[in-house]
Image: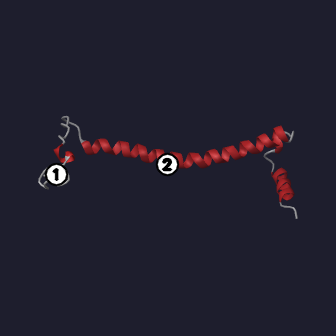
Amino acid sequence: MSENNKPADKLTRIQNRKETPEKPGVDRDHDDKPAHRRTARWRIVIRWMIPLFLVLALIGGMAFGYVFIGKQSLSDVFEWKTWQHVIDLVFAP
């Protein structure tokens, strides 16, 4: 009989594999739940960290550009009047 035509009654490697002996007092279902919770928590944290870092990068870039490149004071960066002027310059007809 060739290698490709094995009888169906033979067990596969996965079926032949011996299961690991369970330790007394260990509940397998209980061990899986904390790992799943940690994974879900990390997904939530990452979903909130990315937009937070983008907003911080935007604020940091505006401050850096206005203070170091534009040679203006840092207190002017957070005034609406300053950014209204910039918007008017960018979108002027």
Q: Name the residue under label 2.
A: 44
The x, y position of residue 87, in whole percent, is 82, 57
Label 2 SS: helix
Please tell me which residue lies in front, 13 or 21: 13
The kind of residue tagged 2 is Ile
- Using the rendered view, name the quadrant where residue 60 is placed: top right
Please tell me which residue lies in front, 92 or 1: 1
Considering only order in the chain, which callout, 1 or 2, is on the residue closer to the N terminus? Answer: 1
Label 1 SS: loop
Q: Are marks 2 and 1 in contact (CB under 8 Å)?
A: no
Q: Residue at x 51, y 45 (%)?
A: 45
Does residue 81 lie above or below 53 as drawn? Answer: below
The x, y position of residue 77, in whole percent, is 80, 45
Q: Which residue lies furthest to the front in this view?
A: 2
Q: Which residue is drawn at 17% across and 55% down?
A: 5
Q: Name the residue under label 1.
A: 2
The kind of residue tagged 1 is Ser
Q: In this view, does 59 lie to the left or right of 92?
A: left
